[in-house]
Structure formats: C-alpha cells, structure tokens
Amino acid sequence: MSWKENWINEAHLPLVIEAAQSMKMEEFIQMIKTHQDVFKKHLLKYGGLLFRGFPVSNENDFAALIEALGTGSFIDYIGGDSPRNKVREGVYTSTEAPPSVKIPLHNELSFVNKYPKHIYFYCHIAPQEKGETIIGDARKIYQDIDSSVKERFIKKGLKYVSCYFYKSDFMRIIAQNAHKSWIDVFETHDKKKVEKLCKENDFELQWTKNDWMRLSHKRPATIKHPITQEDIWFNQAHLYDLNPKFLGWWKYIGVKLVYSRPHTKLHEIFFADETPIPREDLYHVMDVLDSNTIAFPWKRGDVMVLDNVLAMHGRATFSGKRRILTAMTG
C-alpha cells in the first residue's frame, strides 16, 4: 500500500491519507485514479480527507489531484462575496480577509441553489502562527442545535439580502476589501450577464442608486445530504447578521456607521416571511459552531477535501505569511 490512514484528532475529521513512501507527482495522480472509489467512500463516511506527504507543490499539481479524484467539474466562485483572487481556472486564494478576522464555520455557498458538492484546500505557505482552516462535522452540529431554534428555522426558512457597489474607492478602503463590487462577485462588467446569472440562481435583482445592486433570495435552513439522506444544518444566517458577537463591538459600531444608508448594507438576514430572526437564536448557533470547531496546523503540500454538505469550514486568525488555495467541484 502506497499510503497509510490515521487520525490527527479524536473527532475523526479529517481522515489523514499519508504517503507511506516517496513518489513522483505522476505516481501520486495514478494512485488517486486507481483508488478513486476507496477515497470517495471514505469522504462520504467521514466528511473530509487530508492528503499529507505527497508531492503537491503548486496550483497545477493541486488542480491535477482534483481532476484525478473525479468529484465533478470545477465551479467558479460566482455569487460568493468572500474576498479572493483567481489563480487559474477553477482555483482561487481561499480568502483575502485581513489576518485579524476570524471566519466562522460555514458550508460554502450554502445560500445559493447550485452550491458546490465538494471544496478543496491546498497549503502552499503554512502560516507562522495559527491560521488553521477550521472545520466541523455538520451532522453533529445539526444534532447539537436546540430543537426549538431548529424548528423555527426549518418552519420559516431564510431570506438573504446583499448589496454590492459598482465602483467605489471609498468602500474598498473603508471595508478593507471585505465588501466586494458586483463586478468581483459575478466576475463580469456586463449587466446583462449579471442579470442572466441571477435568473439562473433564483436571485431577485434590483438595481439601485449609483449602479449599486440589491440581491435577495430564499433558501431552506437545513437540507438532506443528496446521497446519505442525513439531515444537515446548511445555511449562513450567522454570517449575514453583522452583530457584535461576530464582529466585536468596535467593528460593529464602525459597520453601523458605514452602512447607515439602507441601499449599501452588505448583508441582512431574515426569516423567509421577512420577520426578524431573534439574535439570541443566532448567538446560540454561533456557540454551537464554536463548540464543534476542529483545528489542526497546516503543513506545506497538504491538500484537504471536504464534502461541502457533511463538513463545514472557516479560518482562524493568523500572523505572518499564509497562502492557502481553494477550489470547488459540483
């Protein structure tokens, strides 16, 4: 056997697939292709795999591994608003959010209809301190959320609202690139293409003052895994409520000032009937996510793949250089 399997934590997420011998990249790719079914079964059972000690050294090797595993075609990050840069077709930097910002656990693009089935991460430069790509078992998180909170969310569903600017140096500077333009969100300057993409994804689009846009769309709070049929907490309500617990008081006050005009608010979240979500419900969800957070240090060359429904991910704060690439398949 050219690999060995082990764990790096008691949560058994992710399952570590570690090289048992030295090999060339071509041999590694052949190993993935030959045992593709084994790895896919492991992924479905555990929710995540970490390939460690293999000769992955750049974005092209990363893309080759993804193609070899065969979880689907690459998906562009259209409709998502985390600040990131496109490295090559289908591959992006994981996030360009400031190092001091913690990104809580979430399922990637869970607020859109056509969400990615899998998400990959590749460590090109391991952070000097912290900077883990935190993960969590979405099945356990569903079980741990209070039944009354769960019932409210399931019964009512969710409505996400976002506003994006056209061109604004002020917004780029004041929001430290955390608020993207609609050009960046949809990867085009063409309004017709934007309108087409919105229609395909069931987004309600409204053009507002100075070429700002307002997007809204309704989604369920939970889903069943398409294969295992397990119930999963699958939403980003806690990220769309810009509250003091999420941001800290000073940033929260700053956000309230920056987004004082209704048509500029980055995110808002409501129940699908447009009634407000009790903040204590959102705080409870955040506490459950925190209690289920798993962290492990990156090593250069690591590649992690997550079932985007079974496992959540986020990012810890960090210092020093850090370069983690990401890709999604569907």
Image: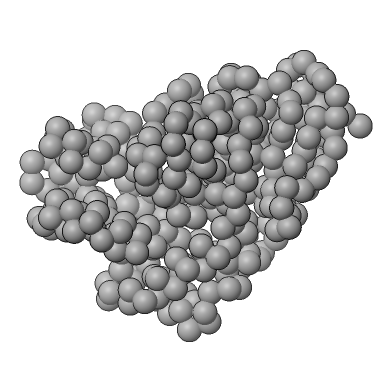
| Image side of residue 103 versus residue 248, left or right | right
The quadrant in which residue 23 appears is top right
* Residue at point 61%, 73% (across, down): 143
Residue sitting nearer the eye, 137 or 118: 137
Residue sitting nearer the eye, 38 or 51: 51
* Residue at point 63%, 32% (across, down): 299
Residue sitting nearer the eye, 3 or 308: 3
Residue sitting nearer the eye, 77 or 143: 143
* Residue at point 33%, 73% (across, down): 279
Q: Position of residue 151 (x, y in %)?
A: 48, 80
Q: Position of residue 249 (x, y in %)?
A: 26, 61
Display coloring: one colour
Q: Position of residue 67 (x, y in %)?
A: 65, 28
| Image side of residue 247 versus residue 109, left or right | left
Look at the picture and state if 143 lies above or below 37.
Answer: below
* Residue at point 62%, 59% (across, down): 137
Look at the picture and state if 255 lies above or below 306.
Answer: below
Q: Position of residue 124 (x, y in %)?
A: 56, 26
- Number of callouts: 0
Residue 126 visible to the viewer: yes
Residue 197 visible to the viewer: no
Look at the picture and state if 317 lies above or below 73.
Answer: below
The quadrant in which residue 17 appears is top right
Give the quarter of the figure containing the C terminus: top right
Give the quarter of the figure containing the N terminus: top right
Residue lying furthest right: 1
